[in-house]
Image (cartoon, helix red, strand yellow):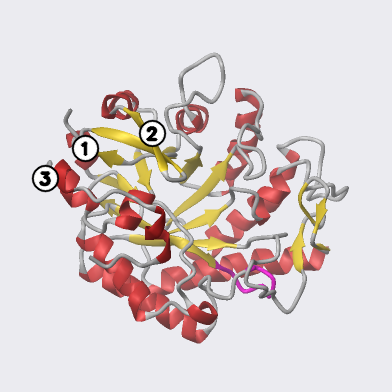
Amino acid sequence: MSTNNLFTPFKLKTLDLKNRIVMAPMTRSFSPNGIPTDEVATYYQKRAEGQVGLILSEGTVIDRISSSNDANVPRFHGEQALAGWKKVIDGVHSAGGQMGPQIWHMGIMDNHHSGWTPSSPFEGPSGLNRPGFNNGNTMTSKDIEDTIIAFGKAAADAKRLGFDTIEIHGAHDYLIDQFFWDATNLRTDEYGGKTLAERTRFAVEVIKEIRRQVGDDFAIIIRLSQFKPSDYTYKLAKTPQEMESWLAPLVDAGVDILHCSQRRFWEPEFEESDLNFAGWAKKLTGKATITVGSVGLSGDFFGAFAGESSEPTSLEELNRRFDRGDFDLVAVGRPILADPNWVAKIKAGKMDELRGFSKEALGELALS
């Protein structure tokens, strides 16, 4: 099976990619006190040298005291942290790559297993991160306003440092997703509402502020998910019509690319079609989409990684959906985490040299 279709260029605003393969954001927690180290910079540079088309960073948190539950997750604010990110993007560019930071606010979180907690309580739309679990404060109108400004400032800093795009983390039950979900957004003001469309307001205002800060020509990506970490079968939008009511305001606010996270890319989103989440998002909005979800090449097939096991699904299936125009880019996570040269090996047809993903890879920054 040929992978040539994945090695065609892609251009959109500030993005000029050599291929369609994206390194998916993956939390690494290798930035002591939130400051990316030289080793972190090398980690990303090695993926650019390995021919990844677009690198999306691990989640990096905005300037809110309680935006993170982990002291070793990188920050995207403060002189030292931004100097670290400057080394990252300069290294990626020196290797001919392109990159965007994934800017993030975790919202209401479980306490970290290390025992570390931020100096201010976690914050979210209603103090909840899942039904029945309250572990923080309900955001005031001023909190919301300041958070929107902090997202915009992070995006402006990304552009100033030389990044090629930014991705907003709006998925996986973190802050923006907590506003989307009726189980965690119980507000009765303008940031709440009975419908998913109404509950997009916080995300819309974040996007508008980011667009105001970076200008019209800078590419903006948002990562979204239907499922919840506490319920993999959950669907935020139950029908295509509800999905359109959710996505259209985000696009109207200024999003260029929808990064559609699902557990397995080959699974249909709704019963009436075999389209996956990214396929539906593109059909409903006309915008470019990234598909992601258990994509990983092993030998002559794409494998699904669920924990430590793998379940094969064919390269032919991914190609079929790509050739049909369901999505524009394909995000790959753990295989690239484990092997910086994964993309280059695929392009060269060196399937026998691919390094498999293992649980141990999560505990290190693979630099070779």
The x and y percentages for residue 349 are 12, 41
Badge 1 amino acid: Gly
SS assignment at label 2: loop
Residue 317 sits in quarter = top left
Real-space Cα separation, disc 3 to disc 2, in angstroms: 24 Å
SS assignment at label 3: loop
Real-space Cα separation, disc 1 to disc 3, in angstroms: 13 Å
User: Residue 299 bears which disc, if any?
Assistant: 1
Closer mark to the observer between disc 1 and disc 2: 1
**Where 122 sits versus 180, above or below?**
below
Badge 2 amino acid: Phe
Quadrant containing the N terminus in the rendered view: top left
Q: Are marks 1 and 2 in contact (CB under 8 Å)?
A: no
Q: Write the residue at 30% across / 60% down.
A: 98
Closer mark to the observer between disc 3 and disc 2: 3
Residue 12 visible? The answer is no
**Where 76 sits versus 335, above or below?**
below
Pick whichever of labels 1 and 3 is earlier in the sequence.
Answer: 1
Q: Write the residue at 28% across / 45% down.
A: 10
Q: Which residues are magenta?
A: 61-69
Pick whichever of labels 3 and 2 is earlier in the sequence.
Answer: 2
Badge 3 amino acid: Ala
Residue 327 sits in quarter = top left
Residue under label 3: 348
SS assignment at label 1: loop
Count residues near mark 2 (Cα–Cα under 10 Å), then give few for <14, some for 14-19, many for 20+.
many
Count residues near mark 1 (Cα–Cα under 10 Å), then give few for <14, some for 14-19, many for 20+.
some
